[in-house]
Amino acid sequence: MRSLPVICSLLFAIAATPASAYEVTVEYKVQVKTLNEFGDVGYVQHSDWLGFDLSVGDVVTGYFTYDTTTPLIRETHDMWALDENFQQSVVFENASGPIDLNYLAGLRAWELDVLDINTHSSSGPDGTATMAASFVDESPYRPLNFHLPAANQWSNFSPSLSSFNYYQGGLHVAGNMTSFRVVPVPEPGTHMMLAAGGMVLLAARRKRRPS
């Protein structure tokens, strides 16, 4: 079979691919605690400022994705930054779709008594979101080799020590994190294995085809 050497090369590449060299996507859910319309209005229970009905108690789902192979840049003696290979978005409960927050997206990490991670991003001049998160125990991180945690290193993350803020125009949305999880993402080896399997099936089909 002519494709056998290619398949063997793919399988060898799978074995040589580091397990940690892939993207990590984090999903967190927030319950809206306060809505504040700037100016004379102040705190409200409902708002249509964003173009849809938003109420205290609604759920916001946030996502951020980063590549574990992208190193953090040390900015001060206890602060690191990530401004590359980082994406963020939020989905409001009654919105028609997600709000892309990849403009000026990035992350800052502080190593104090606990590890604090603060995401920051903007959908434009008027829309920005931040997610401040903390680890109960910083020892698994510190940060590891100046990279963000791999998927299995988020176990010490504490939703109860975290917060969410979103600003757009004259509206400030604040909330408390209610859940947090690392979204399973296929590792590079998984994609390569699927590709190798597809080549085997294609080769077998060609072999059965009458000449």
Image: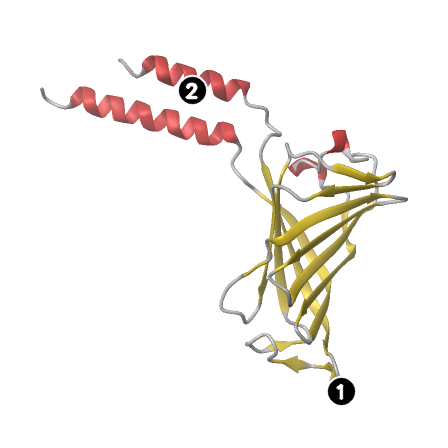
The kind of residue on which mark 1 rests is Asp
Q: Residues within 10 Å of mark 2 (few under 14, many from 20)?
A: some
User: Residue 40 got which mark?
Assistant: 1
Which quadrant would residue 18 be assigned to in this image? top right
Residue 195 image position (x, y, % from top left): 38, 28
The foreground one among 60 and 50 is 50
Which quadrant would residue 60 be assigned to in this image? bottom right
Q: Locate residue 93 relative to residue 208 in the image: left or right.
A: right
- Say what secondary structure mark 1 lies in: loop
Residue at 71% from the left image edge and 58% from the top image edge: 130
Residue at 55% from the left image edge and 76% from the top image edge: 52
- Say what secondary structure mark 2 lies in: helix
Number of marks in the rendered image: 2
Residue under numbered circle 2: 10
Residue at 47% from the left image edge and 16% from the top image edge: 12
Q: CA distance from mark 2 to mark 1?
A: 64 Å
Residue 74 image position (x, y, % from top left): 79, 37
Q: Residue furthest bottom?
A: 40
The foreground one among 141 and 40 is 40
Residue 95 image position (x, y, % from top left): 53, 70
Residue 92 image position (x, y, % from top left): 58, 67
Which tag is nearer the camera, tag 2 or tag 1? Answer: 1
Residue at 54% from the left image edge and 18% from the top image edge: 16
Q: Residue furthest left?
A: 211
Q: Quadrant of the C terminus?
A: top left
Q: Residues within 10 Å of mark 1 (few under 14, many from 20)?
A: few
* For marks 2 and 1 on the same chain, the one whose residue lies earlier in the sequence: 2
* Looking at the image, residue 66 lies above or below residue 131: above
